[in-house]
Amino acid sequence: MGVLATFTPQAAADAHSPWGYYGPVKGIKYKNRATIADSSRLYASTTAAKNGSGNVPSGYLGALARLYKGNTLCASNGYSYTSGPANSLSVPTLGKGCGKGTYHSYGVTKAYTGNGYKAVYTFKSPSVSHRSLAAGAAAPGGGAAPAWPKNAKGETYGSGLEATSPRNAPDLIRAYTTEGKIGYVKRAELEDEPAPASPREAVALQKRLAGEDRRIAVYDAEGSKVLGDFVVRRAPASALTQGR
């Protein structure tokens, strides 16, 4: 498998979720998985791939990575897309994690449907205990989402790690501020980014936004008091791995 652009830190401890299989989407079968790695830095990555040999056209694959410390969101990307024909795409989170603790990777991938994109969660990765380098068992995936509690506004809140699909995450997702406080980001703000309708738009979006950061507020459970901010990072082209 050839590599178009590569980011390959040497992992002292890493663990992969099982492959998740889905499709066909526009006649193509896909698979995805989440990886957690602890090397010179701690990071999560998400891989989206064609299930089988050969490439899909430019812009057909998209992915974002999310890193959780315990049940709290520590780092998240915006979506990245393939910039040329490819068999796979891997996207890492940036930064160094949120301190000593137990971490999971839990990502989302996209596949072009012919009229926009279908978003699918990976399975959760096994846990990695940061700084002790011990890898735990894989976390269960799938099943029904929890009955989320609601605040006075009727907004649901909880851990995005417990959501079972991009459609049933809570309105407020438990997350760390850049200063290490725990609060909640609004799902609508976390996911507030351009949604390409075609591979051509996805490739143009990737070129325009690669490497850009976006700051969103972190609130209390009532979704009203601002406790700090959370940075949604979009991986630069040099951090992406495209296989073919």
Image: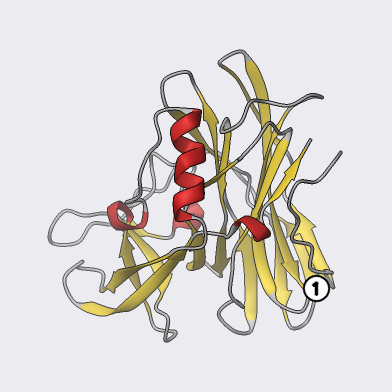
Which quadrant does the N terminus fall into?
top right
Residue 159: x and y, percent?
Answer: 43, 60
Disc 1: CA contacts within 10 A as few (<14), some (14-19) or many (>=20): some
Residue type, numbered disc 1: Ala
Please tell me in which quadrant of the rendered image residue 81 appears.
top right
Residue beneath the point at 80% across and 46% down: 3
Residue shown at the point (79%, 68%) measured from the top left: 9
Looking at this view, name the residue that lies furthest to the top: 27
Q: Is residue 82 above or below residue 237?
A: above
Q: Secondary structure at mark 1?
A: strand
Residue at 74% x, 33% y: name it: 87
Q: Is residue 228 visible?
A: yes
- Foreground of the two, 145 or 109: 109
Q: Is residue 18 left or right of residue 194?
A: right
Q: Is residue 244 left or right of residue 211?
A: right
Position of 131 with respect to 222 (left or right) is right
| Residue marked by disc 1 | 134
The residue at the far left in this view is 153
- Which sits in the foreground, 96 or 56? 56
Say whether residue 174 is left or right of residue 188. right
Estimate the x, y position of residue 57 in percent, counting from the top left. Answer: 63, 26
Question: Is 127 located above or below residue 120 in the figure?
Answer: below
Report x, y in % for residue 73.
Answer: 48, 66
Q: Give residue 189's position: percent from left, percent from top.
A: 29, 57
Where, quadrant-wise, is the C terminus in this rendering?
top right
Q: Residue at x 48, y 68 (%)?
A: 72
Residue 132 is drawn in which quadrant?
bottom right
Count of marks overlaid on the render: 1
